[in-house]
Amino acid sequence: MRDVRIVESLEAVDRGAWNRLFMGEPEDYDYLRAVERAGLEGFRWRYVLGFAGGTLVAAAPAFLMDYALETTLDGGWRRWAERLTRLVPGLLTLKAGCIGSPCTERALFGWAPHLDAEARGAWLRGLLGAFEARCRAEGCAVVALKDVAAADGVLCADARERGYTSVASQPSADLPIDFPDLHAYAARLSPGARKDMRRKLRVQDRVRVELRREIDDVLPRVMGLYAETRARADLALETLTPDYFRAVLAQMDGRATMVLYWQGEDLLAANLLIAQGETLIDKYFCMEAVRGRALNLYFLSWFTNVRLCLETGCTRYVAGQAAEDIKRRLGSRLSGSAHYFRHRNRLCHALLTLAAPLFATGPEAAA
């Protein structure tokens, strides 16, 4: 008998039971618990749990928020919407419930290893149905699925069958680490890219690279770099807090690292990485624009992360969204994803579907 429950804190879930459903996933219980403790403004956390005979066999993180549509419009449409909301505050804000997390690379669903494809499909329908009912009870106008991978065909098909509309999000980049060293990696790049990288990396002798698992002494500067980088992005759903960085570094049992880039005594960039098994995820890269670009710190960080993969035995470097042309040039493969949404009111849903092409697809900050 299927039993689906929804809880408001991951503390209500056994850590081992959760992680057994997400084997090899870097964004595991410890990471999600750190996100929950970070005090991100505007988010209310939910966790959708499926039990069979009292055993956790299916799970997904979720959240509720007041979603301001004007923040996800492009260019002139955003300026027009912002003027409208100044006249009528809250006009374009919808209470929304979303499967996924503002701080994970994609929508996460965890399954007991013994579940076959048919059983997973049945549990998926059960989880979505229960979450939709909870969203109705909490007054949400919109239910959504955030960053569903195109390769997750069952989830995509089920969302469409349930009447959800899809909006493409930015592709995610990952680099297979199937080469023995940096020289072999560089040899795979195009001649133009190799020449460009050699030129860009000449400045590395002027930069000091430091790996940290505790950053309290430099956290104010890191937050300043984060704020500057976020301001350059077209869209950022969440605003990270100092407690986010503290919690992730402190609670992930040595699997989170902050890489700091210094010129003399000046901290110019910071890069948060998390790892699990054979995967390294580049979570956030924050940089002072003018001096950081002059020193090509984005490219230095890329090669630093590839080197870390080689040193630690990681076979997959997940570079995430944004700057996809650069990442493709550096040998990454891109995988598509989409957001899915459904408004409770059919007329409103039809209007949102018509407006969907106007929405921005995701964060884009200049390297």
Image (spheres, helix red, strand yellow):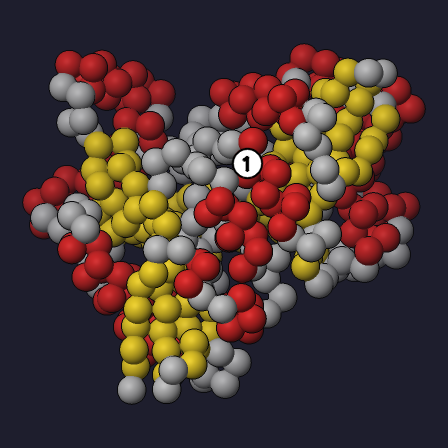
Residue 75 occupies quadrant = top left
User: Residue 327: horizontal and vertical position, in percent?
Assistant: 65, 40
Is residue 262 left or right of 7 when viewed as pictured?
Answer: right
Q: Relative to 329, does residue 298 appear above or below in the rendering?
A: above
- Residue shown at 67% from the left, 12% from the top: 290
Residue 72 occupies quadrant = top left
- Residue shown at 43% from the left, 76% from the top: 56
Q: Quadrant of the C terminus?
A: top right
Q: Is residue 150 visible?
A: no
- Residue shown at 19% from the left, 47% from the top: 140
User: Residue 198: horizontal and vertical position, in percent?
Assistant: 86, 30
Is residue 85 left or right of 4 when viewed as pictured?
Answer: left
Query: Which residue, given by chain and number where applicable, does mark 1 sit on?
Result: 243
Of the pair 14 and 24, the residue shown nearer to us: 14
Is residue 83 left or right of 308 when viewed as pictured?
Answer: left
User: Residue 115: horizontal and vertical position, in percent?
Assistant: 45, 83
User: Residue 134: horizontal and vertical position, in percent?
Assistant: 22, 59
Q: Relative to 31, does residue 282 appear above or below in the rendering?
A: above
Q: Quadrant of the N terminus?
A: bottom left
Q: Relative to 9, does residue 38 appear above or below in the rendering?
A: above
Q: Is residue 32 visible?
A: yes
Task: Please state which amino acid type lies under the numbered disc 1.
Answer: Asp
Q: Relative to 129, does residue 27 appear above or below in the rendering?
A: above
Mark 1 neighbour density, 10 Å: few (under 14) some (14–19) many (20 or more): some
Q: Secondary structure at mark 1?
A: helix
- Residue shown at 49% from the left, 44% from the top: 37
Residue at the extreme front of the image, as rendered = 11
